[in-house]
Every structure is written in structure tokens, then in C-alpha cells.
Image (tube, rainbow, N blue to C red):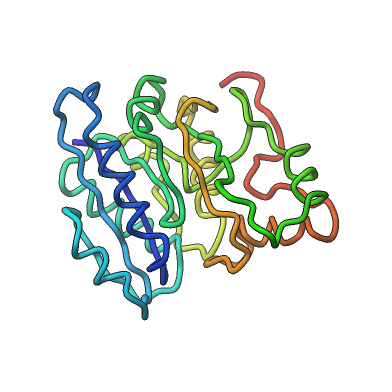
Amino acid sequence: MIGILIPAHNEQDLLAQCLQAALAAGRHPRLNGETVSVVLVLDSCSDRSAEIAAEFPIHVLHIQARNVGAARSLGAQWLLKQGARWIACTDADSLVAEDWLVAQLALNSDAVCGTVAVDDWGSLIDAPAQARYHAAYEACDGHRHIHGANLGISARAYRQAGGFEALSCHEDVQLVKRLQACGASIAWSHRPKVTTSARLDCRAAGGFGDYLKSLLALPAPDQHQLDSRPDTL
């Protein structure tokens, strides 16, 4: 069984499209009929997210932590108990490609770190900030970006690395660092496709939205990227 893990905090505007895309990825013919289970972890939601989620054939968990790491951890634990061999993570403001799961699994690695493309820059992100983003972002194989919106891990490697920590931000980066420390094979690939939102009212302080806001003033370091490149993967 393959699991898709999505944490959400007040995502009523974008959630339906996210779930539609995830379910479509789970129906891809090249998965050969393998069961794909989507788990949505609603964290401290006060909007219509739960009502929207009820319209889809998914599993919904509730948590009152206001902590994305805790939400991801809860969802991962649930999927592992259901027998998931692979956990594919994305975000509730993101859209995975139809062949997203197929592309992750085809890399034959313990974990896959994928890139993201911004769906719609909107009017809040000016042209110079967009240029700074594209100059710093490596949308290619061999990148070193880490996004919870496009991350896949085998069940074995996830358990060996100790899983997601209950961090309010960068729980994905910490997990990848521990995977590397355990000697896991990691594919840094541009093939699994995910588009994400350029919104500035981000749900996690210090996350992708705050990084985009920082580009409006000055070039900023990408905190969703490892500090150094190992000699071998």
C-alpha cells in the first residue's frame, strides 16, 4: 500500500483541488492497481476544511497542535499502521502531477526529494523578487531543495530515521538530514512534479511563504536546502 500524507491548517480555499490531484495520482495505471490511501491531518482548523474533506474518499485525522511536524508525524504513524510501504508527502496548497507517485517510485531510492513550481505568482510578488527566486532555485536533477510538498520516503527508511519531529517548521529538512545520517539512498529529482502556491499568508512561520516574502526585500538563503552537497548520494 502507498500512502499520501497531507497536513492542513485552514485550507478551505485550496483543499479541494489538492485532494482531487492526490486522488488522481493514486489512480495512475502504472501503479498496477496498488492501493493508495490518502490521509489528511487537519490541525487546529476553524474553517470549512473538515466539511470539504468529507466530500472525498480519504481518511481524515484531527489534531490540535498547530504544528506541522506533529501533524505529519501523526499522519505517517497512521499510514504505517495501515501497512504503507511508501509515504508520499505534499501540502494542502499544492497540486501533485498525475504521475507524481509513479515518478517517485521509479527512482528506486529510500527517499525522494522533489522540486516545486510556483503555480501563480499573483500581484504580490514583483518581478525583481521572482527573478531572485529563479536565480537561486535549481529546478533540475541533483538539486538540494527539500520541500514537504514533494517528499517521498520508504516505510523502512522512515522508521530507521525516527520519523518527523514535532517542529513548527523545517521538519522535512530535519528528517532528510537524519535519513542521510542513516545512510539512506536519496534521489534529488526534478521528475516528480508538484505546483505550489505563492501566497504570502503562510501557515507555518519560516516556511515557503516567508521565504517568498523575504525576496521582496533582499535575496535570502533558501532554508529548504541542505547546506552542503555530499560527494555521493
Q: At 37% across and 70% down in the image, what residue appears?
A: 43
The outermost residue toward the bottom is 46
**Quadrant housing the C terminus:** top right
Q: Is residue 177 left or right of residue 12?
A: right
In the depicted structure, whether residue 149 falls above or below residue 49: above
Q: At 79% across and 49% down in the image, what residue appears?
A: 127
The outermost residue toward the front is 123
Q: How far across and how far down the image is residue 90, in percent?
A: 41, 48
Q: At 24% across and 71% down in the image, what residue appears?
A: 51
Q: How far across and how far down the image is residue 168, in percent?
A: 52, 65
Q: How far across and how far down the image is residue 217, in percent?
A: 84, 60
Identify which residue, 144 or 199, lies in the foreground.
Answer: 199
The outermost residue toward the right is 218
Q: At 40% across and 74% down in the image, what residue appears?
A: 65
In the depicted structure, whether residue 149 falls above or below residue 26: below
Identify which residue, 37 or 225, lies in the foreground.
Answer: 37
In the depicted structure, whether residue 131 falls above or below residue 68: above
Quadrant housing residue 3: top left
**Quadrant housing the N terminus:** top left
